[in-house]
Image: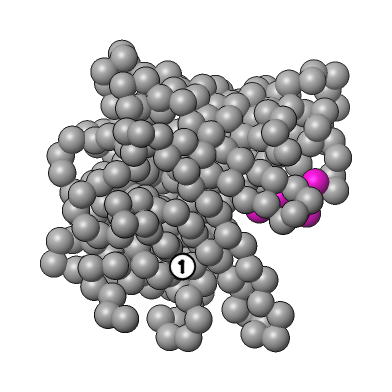
Amino acid sequence: MKKLLFALLSVFVMALFFASCNKYEESMYNKSGYQIKYIWYKSNSGLPNETFTYDKKKLLTNIDIVDSSNMNNIRGESFEFTYNKDKTVQSISYTDGELTETVTFSYLNRYVKYMNYTINGEVRMTSNFYRDDEKAAKITRIVEIYDRQFFEDMQIFTKMKLFPRFIGDMETVKEMAAADSKDLAIYCNKNITYEGENIVKIEADYPVLRKSYVTTQTYSEVLNPYYGLNYCYADDLLGFSKNAVKSKVVSNFFDGNPSTSIQTDYDYKDVNKDNYPRMYTYTTNKNPDIYFKTYITYVSEYKD
């Protein structure tokens, strides 16, 4: 999941058009013509791991995912997009017949103001976005609110597909659900720092867990194909930076004291004429000798 929501540039989340113009909009409708068609995780041959489908207006309608690790038992997932009249995404949904997950977006001046995650029509998580002012594109703070009582049902975690792809980290939600707290709602406060048009620091605090996470990022000259795409929220707000991440360090703290730190480094090996990646590798300090690959094919470069 997280592979997409960085391929989606590592790994969640995609009208996957690229914001090649200077003006930043969370409109989900960018006109560069570079729309993702396929994504592979290991090799750009055989069955794609992710397939993107667009309508005649060039709006993304579906992302279809398969797990090709076991060709005898391919698991398929399909995420469906709906739009407002101004071409901003209204919702993203996934259903398995029993469980329906949906994330809906509310906007102010075409910038995301609220994001609500629902299961079978009931709101279970909300993100509130705060900015410099009503016309500013840059986010200063995000407050997330979780329905802790609902997530106490650990069975739900085996069924959730949309949440880890587009919203957040499953392990952190499990920790919140299991926390020794009488609070029905659990909060996370995120402070965001930019340098130019890229997010360089995210400070996330979970008071109930007595934990905090600080993510610092550096950037390459390669452009980020998810820039301007607000549903690329998971994987450290991937859709909100203009350039592709070069290095990411996530440091964990408990009661203010440092515990673990994970560094991920990215290398873009195949870049097209407009400076968007066709292939990149990444590795972590946990497994420095293991290189993970992601391949991207764009609609404008795809020959049927």
Q: Is residue 161 above or below residue 217?
A: below
Please tell me which residue is depicted at 64% across the width and 24% down the height of the picture.
Answer: 145
Residue 162: give x, y in percent of width and height: 61, 49
Q: Nearer the viewer, residue 99 or 278?
A: 99
The answer to whether residue 122 is seen in the rendering is: yes
Q: Is residue 176 magenta?
A: no
x then y, percent, for residue 155:
85, 48
Give the camera-side residue of 24 and 181. 24
Query: Residue drawn at (62%, 51%), measured in percent from left and top?
Result: 94
Judged from this view, the residue extending furthest toward the top is 133
- Quarter of the image where one finds residue 141: top left
For residue 267, what is the image quadrant? bottom left
Q: Check the image and report above or below for 15 versus 118.
A: below
Location of the N terminus by quadrant is bottom right
- Name the residue carrying label 1: 51
In the image, residue 171 sits, relative to residue 24, either above or below, namely below
Which residue is depicted at the point 53% across and 64% down?
64
Q: Is residue 122 left or right of residue 266?
A: right
Magenta part of the chain: 156-161
Location of residue 43 in the rendering, given as x and y in whole percent from the top left corner: 44, 81
Identity, as a three-letter code, of the amino acid under mark 1: Thr
Q: Residue at x 31, y 13 (%)?
A: 133
Q: Which type of secondary structure does the marked residue at label 1 adopt?
A: strand
- Whether 286 is drawn above or below 86: the answer is below
Q: Nearer the viewer, residue 268 or 50?
A: 50
Label 1, residues with CA under 10 Å away: few <14, some 14-19, many ≥20: some
